[in-house]
Amino acid sequence: MPLITSAGIGSGLDLESIIKASVDAENRPKMLSFMEKEETLQVELSALGEVKSAMSKLQDIVKKLADPDNFGKRIANITQPSTGDIISVTPTSEISVGTFDIAVKQLAQGSRLVSADAAFSSVDDVVSASGGTLTFDAGTGNTFSLAVDAGATLSELRDAINSSTDNFGVTANIVNTGDPAVGSKLVLTSNVTGDTNDLTITSDTSELDAISTAAFGGAAGSGGMTYEQSAQDAIITVDGLTVNSDTNTFKDAVQDMTIKALAESEQTAGAGIYDEAKLNVEYDRESVNKMIDEFVTAYNNLVGNIGFQTRIGKPLNGDASMRSLSGQLVNTLSTPLTGAGPFESIFDIGLGVDKDGYLQKSSLVRSLNEAMDSNFDDIGTAFAGEGGVASQLETLLSGYIDSGGLIKERETNLNGQLDDLEDDVANHEYRMASLEERLRKQYAGLDVLLAQMQQTQAYLGAQLANLPGFTKAKS
């Protein structure tokens, strides 16, 4: 018997529509139910994601507020003299605020050595026929030795000094004067500064005396290199008090502050008076104001997000965890403070909460700027101190959004339900495919039977029509 692949072909009945209607009757209600459930889960997941994102932004700024170092910053405002910049300053959080007058009387410098006149006529002069060793020293811990090859020229010596991997900071140059009486000059400059740190050069052979500061073996006379510039300290005055440093950096000349000398002060002719820079060290109020502004914005963003997602018709309307979070936020802001001077809560430093639960800068008790004027360090304690508001908020937020937190667990649960729903849809589609296959088999049999009956009817009709006296009924 031939297989009927499309239902109804044999019988002429619209069996395809019957099969489709039967499958749709089973499939559509279930699929609509799946779609509604998926939409509900996705909307709730999205709403939780919005709240979680707002909490994460608040958590980021709360971590800054929980760091005491962020409240201990100082800024240094420098008014340089009209002749140019003479100092730069790096204060630490430990320095007391105040004003200082600073002058730079002398910059630190390294020493410079020059070879004697006519010691070398050109860069090709041989410095040592048999070779030897030069030793360079400049202050404590700065030393290196250099092997001079036999027959080395002045230019080769220069290159060897500059390329030595042990070189602590000696630069060699050659100046060709063009004067036969002076010749080519070897110039050695040390970057080691400080009064007692002049560059010295000794050798193990008298052949190299022309490049030494002392004659070999303690012989009478000095070496051929002479000082064109001696190493010296930097000298500044702070409020008239003289301070020396072997470098241009003065650490703790004013306690907990680093001052760097950039240029020497101009001096009033004949008066011994130096131009001064005026340094004003004060609390970094701007950075604290900025942090608190960011905190207010992030807090209000979270409050607004919770309010929006819990409105009537929204997925988190009536959600107990959101109501609990709102209450915990307000309670945490109201945490009693200890060790924060006159501040009993952060509402005493110029913050307040309006009737809708939004945080705002307020001046009902005092403004934030007034609190900074009178008790700057206590503001840091209010937020970052032990038991401060920031640490309390950090604990609260972590309990919701960190791994194992309430919102994180709910997201995991919702994603699990979506995965289960996906499996349910796949199982249902398999059942519908099986149902359609079963119906097709059943209707295929019916289709064949009806086709056979129609063929039989047509055959009998034809036979009867051929019988004598048979009259075909008029239509």
Image (cartoon, grey):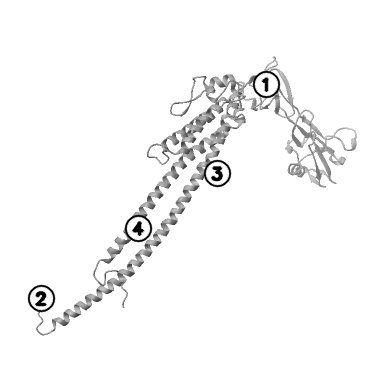
Numbered tag placed on residue 404 in the rendering: 3
- Indicate left or right for 74 with 21 as reference: right
- How far separated are the C-alphas under marks 4 and 1? 90 Å
Read off the residue under disc 4: 27
Q: Residues within 10 Å of mark 1 (few under 14, many from 20)?
A: many
Quick one: label 4 or label 2, which is nearer the N terminus?
4
Q: Secondary structure at mark 4?
A: helix
Q: Compute the Cα span from label 4 to label 3.
A: 39 Å
**Labelled pair 2, 1 in contact (Cβ < 8 Å):** no
Q: CA distance from mark 3 to mark 2?
A: 87 Å
User: Residue 456: x, y in percent?
Assistant: 22, 78
Q: What number is the disc on residue 103?
A: 1
User: Residue 117, position in %: x, y?
Assistant: 79, 34
Q: Position of residue 134 (x, y in %)?
A: 82, 41
Can you identify the residue that label 2 sits on?
473
Q: Which is more N-terminal, label 1 or label 3?
A: 1
**Three-letter residue code for mark 4:** Asn
**What amino acid type should be assigned to the residue bearing mark 3?**
Gly
The amino acid beneath tag 2 is Ala
Q: Residues within 10 Å of mark 2 (few under 14, many from 20)?
A: few
Q: Earlier in the sequence, mark 3 or mark 2?
A: 3
Task: Identify the residue at horizontal 40%, vertical 36% (top origin).
Answer: 311
Dots 3, 1 in contact, CB < 8 A = no
Could you tell me which quadrant the C terminus lies in?
bottom left
Quadrant of the drawing holding the N terminus: bottom left
Marks 2 and 1, how far apart in space?
A: 134 Å
Report how far apart the C-alphas of labels 4 and 2 lie in the structure. Answer: 48 Å
Amino acid type at circle 1 is Ala
Mark 3 to mark 1 CA distance (whole Å): 60 Å
* Image quadrant where residue 108 sits: top right
Query: Is the residue 459 above or below the residue 340 in the image?
Result: below
Q: Secondary structure at mark 3?
A: loop
